[in-house]
Image (cartoon, grey):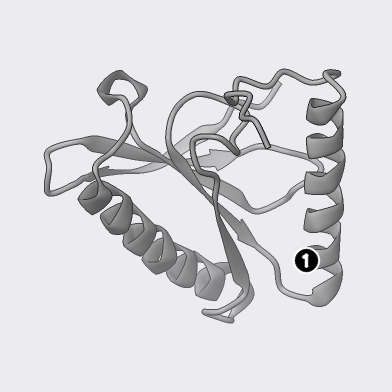
Amino acid sequence: MIKNQVVDNFTLKSGAECQLLNIRNDLIPNYYLLCFPKTLGEPSDVDVTEMLTLGVQYAQKIAFQKLGDREAFSIIYSGYSARREKGWHVHIVLLGNRWRKAWLYSVLAMKNLLQAFGVRKDDAPKLKN
């Protein structure tokens, strides 16, 4: 089994140490996760802004290295009530073309349906509509 690989570490201005992971996932290739330390709870607004900026900068860099196009990526931020697992993070997915983007959205839709039906683990708070 191939494990997720730490690609880089970042120290935010607040002193929080964040990790960038290369997520090994057969369904979503070229998938990265920029993670805020779970032990620190939720990041401040300043930390969130800094992490999103770092995520975009890294996505541009790696998209150019791997695909030759600095804009061939999507960034996904899942807020507290929308994410599956505890711990704040930014998803970075390299795309390259419309088919890969359509595939990504299809996989995400299936994962979210499984969570909504209770088939897949979901730590998100249950909010009233």
Three-letter code for the amino acid on which mark 1 is drawn: Lys
Numbered disc total: 1
- Residue 38 location, x and y as percent? 36, 23
Quadrant in which residue 122 is drawn: top right
Q: Position of residue 10 (x, y in %)?
A: 25, 45
Eyeballing the image, is 42 above or below 53? above
Depth check, front residue: 23 or 34: 34
Measuring from the top left, give residue 2's x and y in whole percent.
66, 27
**Quadrant of the image for the N terminus?**
top right
Q: Residue at x 58, y 81 (%)?
A: 69
Residue at x-position 52% and y-position 75%: 64
Query: Circle 1: is it few (<14), some (14-19), or many (20+) Cα within 10 Å?
Result: some
66 relative to 70, above or below: above
The answer to whether residue 73 is left or right of residue 96 is left
Q: Is residue 94 left or right of residue 17?
A: right
Q: Which residue is mark 1?
A: 101
14 w.r.t. 92: above or below = above
Name the residue: 48% across, 64% down.
59
Q: Residue 90 in the image: x percent, y percent?
A: 48, 48
Q: Identify which residue is drawn at 86% across, 18% down.
A: 119
Residue at the front extreme, as displayed: 129
Q: Nearer the viewer, residue 98 or 82?
A: 82
